[in-house]
Amino acid sequence: GAAVPDARYRPVIHYSPANGFMNDPNGLILADGIYHLYYQHNPGAPVSGNVHWGHATSRDLIHWQEQALALFPDARGQAFSGAMVWDGANTSGLFPDGQGGMAALFTRAGPGRQVQELAHVQTQSPRLALYKGNPVLDEQSASFRDPKVFWHDPIQRWVMVVAHARRHEIGFYHSTNLRDWRHTGSFGHAGLLGLDYECPDLVELPVEGGSSRWVLFLSINPGAPTGGSTVQYFVGHFDGLGFTAQDQATRLLDAGQDFYALQTFANTPGRVLGMAWMNNWLYCNATPAHPARGAMTLPRELSLRRRDDHWHIVQRLPDLSPWAAEAGQELSWHDATSGTLACQSWSDLHALEITASGRLSPDSRLRIRLTNRQGECLEAGLDNGSYPGFYLDRSNVRGFEHPFWNHKAIIQVLHTPLPHFDCQIVIDQSSIELLGMQGENAATFLHFFKYPPEQLSVQLENGHWQDGKLRIRPIG
Ligand code: FRU
């Protein structure tokens, strides 16, 4: 049935606009100590369409201030996804003499035609000023979108990656001035195809212990093995012209159903930070509104790990200590046996962060459950059977149902037997994010309780939990 707006679902530490609909993060950039988050936004109604660029700013990546709208639909089409760059040397000539500034490349999506346009941030107005010579890139295509642009020092040029969505191809383009673009390479027909390739992003990720590797992130929708929208990535080489994957593997960034359109921040030297839209095109127009629909994930710092001759993306959440509302509970033990190890009451004012580590005996199960008297239960856990795995389970949370709403996410831990484990879980008013095994495993889910959640409990079933550490604290 039609969802009734309910303020209880508004996230506490995740960005969501005051009203309307939000999807992809766009134009992520750090400039003058301020993080900018632009995003796909329908300001008029909590349903997709009528696409503008909304805008929010933050100094800490946790507290966001909503700003005025930045890009608008016009006679040529809607303002689809894109990226922001710091044009410090004024290569574009869009800024006053001797000054640099922020410039956006984005898709203007008209009926039957998608082209790339250029705009820049003006000092006097929140609105981005459109370049007079738009479009800057037109391949006469109806599905050509989501440019991500970066400056590549070795060739002294801007590089654009952009999706030929239906053709399942990523195009690479060069420019010296952000206005004239030349095609230099293609990558495609790789990994999961789905109906459309969307939102490519190419970044050089630091490898733990030194060196770096290029990673191409690529969103597909629909067609994910997890149902609908998902983000895959390829590890490989970028020679300045195009990208080559170094193996045939398809890797997913997140095992949950609500993680899409990842984009990384521009202008954060030495660090790669990304954010994704915490939703799925299969049901994003039907989830309960608060009254807005759509939220971003927490920012995640990205790197690569080489383990057992394989590449793994490592994701880390920011240290939430500065926003801990109370000390919470901090427990540790040498050996705990089956039973309830901790309880914490839930508050609508806070998110909860749970961190746990230690060694679990074979066939034991760690269960972290958020429940209420009406019998609803949101669960995260680690099952140490013969194929150990983290899981999320929202099957007993009853505020939203949809035929494509998957109830469980499973991330198999690909080490056997399970060594020392660790995980960090953040539960906000309508989301749960789990990172495990030093950031190698990730799963993100939305959840909508019908009745208010009341209590979080941590239980061990069927075995021992040794060298245990457990911390539960309210955040926000
Ligand atoms: C991805 C996407 C992009 C497009 C935008 C439209 O979620 O479909 O391909 O630019 O959303 O809002």
Image (cartoon, grey):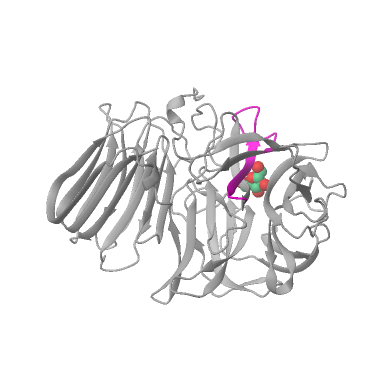
Q: In this rendering, does residue 108 appear at all?
A: yes
Residue at 69% from the left image edge and 64% from the top image edge: 151
Please give the name of the residue rendered at 53% of the width and 26% of the height, measured from the top-left corner: 291
- Relative to 397, say whether 161 is above or below: below
- What residue appears at the point 62 percent right and 42 percent down from the top-left corner? 39
Q: In the rendered image of this protein, does residue 91 appear above or below residue 308?
A: above
Specify whether 398 is left or right of 29. Answer: left
Residue 70, picture quadrant: top right
User: Looking at this rendering, what residue extends furthest in the right direction?
Assistant: 133
Residue 165 in view: no
Screen quadrant of the C terminus: top left
What residue sits 20% from the left and 59% below the top? 360
Q: Looking at this view, is 68 or 355 the one in front?
A: 68
Residue 67 drawn at (x, y percent): 63, 35
> In the picture shown, does residue 204 fall above or below 460?
below
Q: Relative to residue 350, is residue 184 drawn left or right?
A: right
Q: From the viewer's perspective, is 83 left or right of 3?
A: right
- Residue furthest front in the image: 98
Q: Percent position (x, y) of residue 325?
A: 34, 37
On the rendered structure, is 302 left or right of 386? right
Q: Which residues are magenta?
A: 32-53
In front here: 443 or 153? Answer: 153
Residue 64: give x, y in percent of width and height.
53, 39
Magenta span includes 408: no
Report the residue that reaches farthest toward the top. 4
Front-lying residue, 419 or 316: 316
Q: Position of residue 257 (x, y in %)?
A: 47, 47
Tell me which corner region of the image, top left, top right, bottom left or bottom right, holds residue 383. bottom left
